[in-house]
Image (cartoon, rainbow, N blue to C red):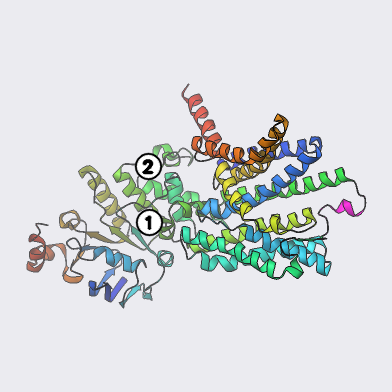
Amino acid sequence: METLRIERLRKSFGGLMAIKDLSFHVDQGEILGLIGPNGAGKSTVFNLIMGSFRPDYGRILFKSQDITGWPTYRVVNQGLARVFQIARYFPHKTIYENVEISAIPNEIFQRAENTETKTITVCKRTGLCLEENCQGGNGCLCRAQWPGMLPQGGLRRLEIARAIGTEPELLLLDEPFAGLSPQEVDEISQLISDLRSEGQTIIVVDHNMRGVMGLVDRVVVLCFGEKLAEGTPDEIVRNPHVQEAYLAGGGV
Amino acid sequence: MSPRTFKLILLALTMITLGLIGPYLPPKWATTVTFAQLFAIYAIGWDVLSGMTGQISFGHIFFVGVSGYTTGLLNMYLQWPLWVTIPSGMILAMLMGLLFSVPALRLKGPYFSLVTLILPLAAARLVIILGDWTGGELGKFGATPLCPIQQFVFDFRLNQLCNYYIIWGVLALLAVGLIWLASTRIGKILEAIRENEEAVEAAGINPAKYKIFAFAVSALVVGFGGALSVHLNEGVFFNALLSLTASTEMIVASVIGGMGTILGALWGGLLIRIGEQGMRDLAHLSGFTDLEKWATFFFFALLLVFLFVARLGLLPLIANLFRRRAAVRKES
């Protein structure tokens, strides 16, 4: 079943066509890789989906609902969440409180529901809290730690936790491995495949093909805002157009 | 101890102290502290919007004016009783808050602040244009006194203490209410907006909705104070209701006490009004009449020095001391 469908999306900034008639879709439960050299328009696609920008032309359908041009918070409430490459967090709130904001519904006067269990579950699942010291809820490390104490990999986990806290049906990961040590790359990679095995639908953006090839079911290659190729990782690696676009810059 | 419990304990100590000293204050000081408590209401009202969400309003005195002139004029011209006019003033202030928050909050940072600054300027013009009605710059005397006892017996001291405790009670109620609000998920979101608005939106929450809510609550609280001030002064006076100095002093109060903490703003409000008068008295006691003119200047210079020492304000300073002591105790 189709979760997300992008139809003939077009966006230009001044005279520059950043996205040219881009169409692709994501099926439920799959991991789609969106790759391309630097400046290909990958992050712009995410910005268009999440409502940061409005497309000039084209439609974005999520679960058959047209969400083109919706403000970000509505897109998120519809079931989409984005993990930013540079973590966007609340520096003066604890890690727990950072995740809690995602678990709170967008209703001022609704009766309070229990956000605590949900927040702790998300913290454990992303490895921000360890199971052993987190039994009673109050002993959790994430309640006594601030984001400033986290290493790069931890911040990426926090960013993923804040996204999962909104209970998304489709998760957009923007360069999840950028700036991480090899060990952290393995850990985050493990976390992503765990999420996939739990049935999470994911789009991963990366400029580095090697990082995502083992993770994704299907790949869409972008080059200068246009779709260059689409297929399984094997097909993509063998595709001469992709090799040309990438090998010219020494990517693969 | 949760931050809420910590704040409520300190609030209780503050309010009990104020409650106990009331009868022992000399008449001049009883009036000073009454107005200090009134100003603390403005300060905590400002803090809900600007301190908590980081949308700095320069013109909150506008809501004092809207509510004050509403209650005063309804009371003086239509002879409506206080318990009708005060809520009318508050509700109108809140509606004004809602009305102006929608376009104002589309603006960010200094642009938002500038728009809020224009509101009291425009209102001041209007009051002067309608001077025949409002009394203009001179003001208009004749509103029902705040203390109901005064209608039966006239005893200066009794009346003074009655006013003192009415304002005291309202301040205590509003402070408890706002500290509670700050601890709910609404408060958490308002603080999150100050820290990173984009991250709030990415969490599926509409920041505009929460900011408008904060704006309305803030206008309501400040409007309550403004309405009380009219009946405390027994009339509508331009300098009490639309003073830009008071508008900026609300910001100073909150910064001195600790922005976005409610209790800090309450302390800051009390401190500014009491400190100013205290400095003047000290100067007077010193015997140099010239010094009295300088008192307010020295007071603000002292506040400036304080801010260099404790950038985050009084309450965070105290909270940090407690935290450090608790940490040391844990280790030993």
Q: Judge from the rendering whether residue B94 lies leftward or rightward of residue B115; answer left or right.
A: right
Q: Is residue A240 left or right of residue B231?
A: left
Q: Residue at x 47, y 55 (%)?
A: B193
Task: Look at mark 2 in the image and give the residue it sits on.
Answer: A148
What's the residue at 9%, 68% (across, down)?
A241
Q: Which is nearer the eye, B332 or A125?
A: B332
Point out the image quarter for the N terminus of chain A.
bottom left
Picture residue at 27% right of the left edge, 75% below the top? A10
User: Percent position (x, y) of residue B174?
Assistant: 67, 50
Q: Which residues are magenta?
A: B144-154
Question: Hey, which quadrant is residue B301 in on the image?
Answer: top right
Mark 2 or 1, which is nearer the eye?
Answer: 2
Residue lying farthest top?
B332
- Identified by mark 1, the residue type is Ala
Query: Dot 2 falls on which chain?
Result: A
Q: How many marks?
A: 2
On the same chain, marks 2 and 1? The answer is: yes
Look at the image and say whether residue B294 sits in the magenta stretch.
no
Position of residue B296 relative to residue A221, above or below, is above
Q: Is residue B150 magenta?
A: yes
Q: Nearer the viewer, residue A64 or B159?
A: B159
Q: CA distance from mark 2 to mark 1?
A: 19 Å
Q: Quadrant of residue B87?
A: bottom right
Residue A252 x, y percent position in the rendering: 11, 57
Secondary structure found at label 1: helix
